C-alpha cells in the first residue's frame, strides 16, 4: 500500500488511549486514521490491567496525571453505561497492616482532598474488619474510598474504536511504523512491510514504544522501561469473600498489590511491579506468582483455597518521570502522549480531549460534526450484573461464561471485528472462564469459521 491520500490526523497506537483519541477526533470535521502494529485494538497493555476506574484520590496533587484522571473518571463513568461497557461501583478500602502505615492514612486523606476528592474517610481497624470480615490478621486501620468503580477494560477500547470507525475513522492493523519523513506539509509514515500513510498531524499514542516513535521524530525527553505487573484471577466461587477493592498503602514506586472483584464476577490479585528491559516479556514468572500468593495469604487468606482461573502479566509504560509526558511540536505538527501508566484506562477520555487541545494549539483547525449525523454505538455488556443474551434463551456456545453463538457472530461482523481467538475472548469472554476453552474451544472455532468464512485452522492458530 502506498500513500494515496493525506489524512488530517494519524493516531499511532490503538490501545485504550489511542482509541480514545481517535474517537474524539472522529467527532470533528477531519479525516482520521488509527494505526496499530498488532492485529487488533486494545491487544497490548490495555488488555492486561487491574480494571479499576479510579477516582484519582492517590495521585500527586497538581500533576498532569491527577488532572486528567479526575476528568477521565467523570467522563468514563458517564460514557461506559451509555455504550454497553460494564461498570460497577463497589468502593474500596485502603488497608494499613502496621502502625506506620496507619499513621500515614490521614496524610493520604489530605492528598485525596488536594486532588478534589473529599469523600475519603479514615476508619479504625475494627471498622475495616466489620466491612471485610475475611481479611487476614494484623489490620491496623483503613481509609474508605466509596466512589472507586470496577470497569470492563477490554470493551472500553473496543467501544472507542468502534465509535471512531463507524463515524469515519480508518483503522489500519498490523502496521508497524519504523520510519518517517517530516515534510513541509505532511509527514510520511513508513511501515515495516513497506506500506505508507501521509498525515498532516500525528499523535503518538504508541504506549510501550512511544519513546521509539518520539525519537523517529527527532525528539528526546523520556525513555520507557517496562514495568511488568503479574496478576492471578480466581474463580467466581470466590466472589463472596470480598465486598469491595482492597488497596494497599502506596509507595513511591507502585500502588502495590491489591485484591479486587471484577465486573465479570471473579476476584483478582496483583499486580507485581518489576522494572524490566524486554518490551515483549508478558509471560508470568514463578517468582512473581510466589510473591502474589504470599501477599494474598496475608490480605485474604481464604482466597488461596479457591480455584485459579487464569494468570497473566501486563507491561506498563513506565519512564524515569513520575508524571505523564505530554508534548506538542508545532514545526513537526506532532503531539506525544508518553509515559501513560496504569491510570491510562481511567484517564483515556480526558487524554482524548487533551490531544485535541494540543493539536489545536499547534495549528489543527476543525469544527464539530453535526451531532445528528453521528452513528451511535452499543456493545453487549459482559458484566455479571448486566442483562446478557443467554438469559433470553439464545444458544450458549461457551458455558463457563454463558456466551451465545449470536455474540460470536456479532464480534466477527463488527466494524472493528475479532480476527482471532484472543479478539473473540476480549469481545465476548468466550474461553475466558473456568475451563479456559478446554470444553468449548473447538465449537467456538468451528462457529467462528462459518461466521467469518475463514478456515477453522486459522481460528485454531494452526499453520
Image (tube, rainbow, N blue to C red):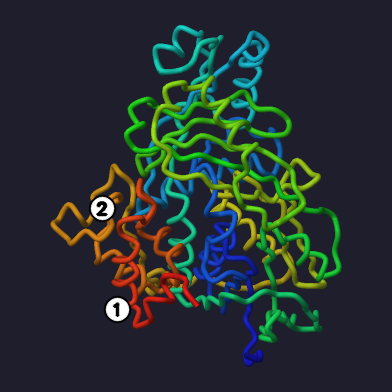
Is 296 rendered above or below residue 402?
above
Mark drawn on residue 450: 1
Residue situated in front as seen by the camera: 441 or 191: 441
Quadrant of res 367: bottom right
Of mark 1 and mark 2, the one earlier in the sequence is: 2
- Under tag 1, what secondary structure? helix
Mark drawn on residue 163: none
Residue situated in front as seen by the camera: 215 or 276: 276
Query: Could you tell me residue 225's position as x and y percent?
Result: 76, 50
Residue at the image position 42 percent from the left and 65 percent from the top: 421
Mark drawn on residue 399: 2
Quadrant of res 240: top left
Residue situated in front as seen by the camera: 184 or 408: 408
Q: CA distance from mark 1 to mark 2?
A: 20 Å
- Under tag 2, what secondary structure? loop
For label 1, count other residues whose C-alpha is less than 10 Å away and answer few (under 14), some (14-19) or many (20+). Answer: few
Query: Could you tell me residue 31's position as x and y percent?
Result: 56, 79
Amino acid at each position: 500500500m502506498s500513500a494515496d491520500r493525506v489524512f488530517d490526523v494519524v493516531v499511532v497506537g490503538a490501545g485504550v488511549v489511542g482509541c480514545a483519541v481517535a474517537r474524539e477526533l472522529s467527532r470533528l470535521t477531519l479525516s482520521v486514521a488509527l494505526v496499530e502494529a498488532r492485529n487488533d485494538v486494545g491487544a497490548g497493555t490495555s488488555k492486561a490491567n487491574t480494571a479499576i476506574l479510579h477516582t484519582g484520590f492517590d495521585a500527586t496533587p497538581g500533576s498532569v496525571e491527577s488532572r486528567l484522571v479526575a476528568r477521565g473518571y467523570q467522563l468514563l463513568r458517564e460514557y461506559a453505561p451509555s455504550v454497553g461497557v460494564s461498570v460497577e461501583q463497589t468502593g474500596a478500602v485502603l488497608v494499613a497492616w502496621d502502625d506506620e502505615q496507619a499513621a500515614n492514612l490521614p496524610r493520604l486523606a489530605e492528598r485525596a482532598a488536594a486532588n478534589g476528592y473529599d469523600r475519603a474517610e479514615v476508619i479504625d481497624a475494627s471498622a475495616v474488619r466489620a466491612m471485610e470480615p475475611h481479611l487476614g490478621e494484623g489490620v491496623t486501620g483503613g481509609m474508605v474510598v466509596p466512589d472507586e468503580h470496577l470497569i470492563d477494560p477490554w470493551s472500553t477500547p473496543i467501544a472507542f474504536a468502534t465509535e471512531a470507525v463507524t463515524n469515519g475513522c480508518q483503522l489500519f492493523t498490523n502496521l508497524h511504523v519504523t520510519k518517517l519523513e517530516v515534510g513541509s506539509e505532511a509527514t510520511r509514515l513508513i511501515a515495516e512491510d513497506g506500506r505508507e500513510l501521509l498525515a498532516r498531524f500525528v499523535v503518538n499514542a504508541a504506549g510501550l514504544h512511544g519513546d521509539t516513535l518520539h525519537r523517529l521524530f527527532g525528539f528526546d525527553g523520556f525513555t520507557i522501561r517496562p514495568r511488568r505487573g503479574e496478576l492471578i484471577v480466581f474463580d467466581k466461587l470466590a466472589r463472596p469473600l470480598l465486598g469491595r477493592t482492597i488497596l494497599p498503602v502506596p509507595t513511591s514506586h507502585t500502588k502495590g498489590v491489591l485484591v479486587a472483584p471484577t465486573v465479570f464476577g471473579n476476584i483478582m490479585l496483583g499486580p507485581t511491579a518489576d522494572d524490566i528491559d524486554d518490551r515483549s516479556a508478558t509471560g508470568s514468572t514463578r517468582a512473581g506468582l510466589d510473591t502474589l500468593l504470599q501477599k494474598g495469604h496475608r490480605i485474604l487468606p481464604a482466597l488461596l483455597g479457591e480455584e485459579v482461573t487464569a494468570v497473566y502479566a501486563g507491561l506498563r509504560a513506565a519512564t524515569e518521570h513520575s508524571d505523564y509526558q505530554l508534548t506538542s511540536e508545532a514545526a513537526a505538527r506532532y503531539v506525544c502522549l508518553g509515559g501513560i501508566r496504569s491510570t491510562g484506562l481511567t484517564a483515556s477520555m480526558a487524554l482524548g480531549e487533551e490531544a485535541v487541545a494540543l493539536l489545536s494549539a499547534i495549528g489543527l483547525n476543525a469544527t464539530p460534526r453535526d451531532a445528528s449525523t453521528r452513528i451511535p454505538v452499543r456493545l453487549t455488556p459482559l458484566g455479571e450484573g448486566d442483562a446478557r443474551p443467554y438469559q433470553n434463551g439464545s444458544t450458549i456456545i461457551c458455558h463457563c461464561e454463558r456466551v451465545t453463538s449470536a455474540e460470536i457472530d456479532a464480534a466477527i461482523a463488527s466494524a472493528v471485528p475479532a480476527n482471532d481467538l484472543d479478539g473473540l475472548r476480549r469481545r465476548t469472554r468466550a474461553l475466558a472462564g473456568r475451563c479456559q476453552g478446554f470444553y468449548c474451544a473447538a465449537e467456538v472455532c468451528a462457529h467462528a469459521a462459518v461466521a467469518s468464512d475463514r478456515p477453522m485452522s486459522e481460528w485454531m492458530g494452526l499453520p
